[in-house]
Amino acid sequence: MRKHILFLLQPGFCDEKGGPFFCPDCATVEGFLRYAPEIEDRIEVRRIDFPRPRKEIVELAGEANQGCPVLVLGDVDELPPEAAGSGQTGKAFIAGSTGICEFLGRTFGVVRPHP
């Protein structure tokens, strides 16, 4: 079974607006991982640098889907409602902190975001 791959931005990056910064959506997912640390044993987590193009994400989810956080789905029986598909790679992914945390919480039977 191929594992899900979660991409998060490394904090402390700088851009044209200054910095150092962190990604608020990635921080939300990092917080979720603190609440449910067993998740990191069941998926692959890759903390990547800020600059684009983000080659690792592009290879899996396509150039248009390289925002973070993003969870590229491994083997699933059926696509969850949070998922989208990459027309470029054919792989399914979930973008955004709420969808990622909801899917992982539901899939692994741990805490989920309050609706």
Image (spheres, rainbow, N blue to C red):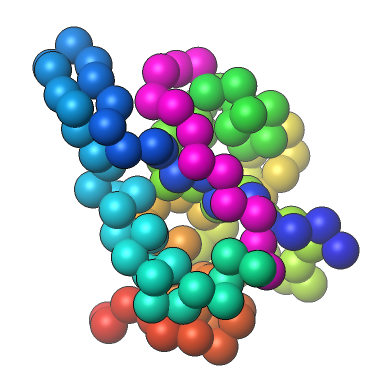
Residue 21 shown left or right of residue 105 in the figure: left
In the rendered image, which quarter contains the C terminus? Answer: bottom left
Q: Seen from this angle, which residue lies furthest right?
A: 1
Q: Which residues are magenta?
A: 42-53
Query: Where does the image place residue 106, in percent across and percent down from the top left?
Result: 53, 82
Of all residues, the one furthest to the top in this rendering is 16
Q: Is residue 33 left or right of residue 43?
A: left
- Residue plotted at (44% across, 27% down): 49
Q: Residue at x 57, y 44 (%)?
A: 46
Determine the residue positioned at 46% across, 77% down: 36
56, 13: nearer the viewer: 13
- Residue 102 drawn at (x, y percent): 44, 73
Tell me: residue 39, above or below residue 100: below
Residue 61 sits above or below residue 103 on the image: above
Horizontal arrangement in the rendering, residue 58 relative to residue 110 (left or right):
right
Residue under the image location 20 percent in, 32 percent down: 21
How many numbered badges does the structure rendering display?
0
* Magenta stretch holds residue 47: yes
Q: Position of residue 31 (x, y in %)?
A: 33, 65
Residue 19 position in % (x across, y down): 15, 24
**Is residue 88 something that shows in the picture?**
no
| 15 versus 79 height, above or below | above
| Image vertical order of residue 100 relative to residue 87, above or below | below
Residue 21 is a magenta residue: no
Can residue 89 be seen in the rendering of this structure?
yes
**Residue 1, picture quadrant:** bottom right
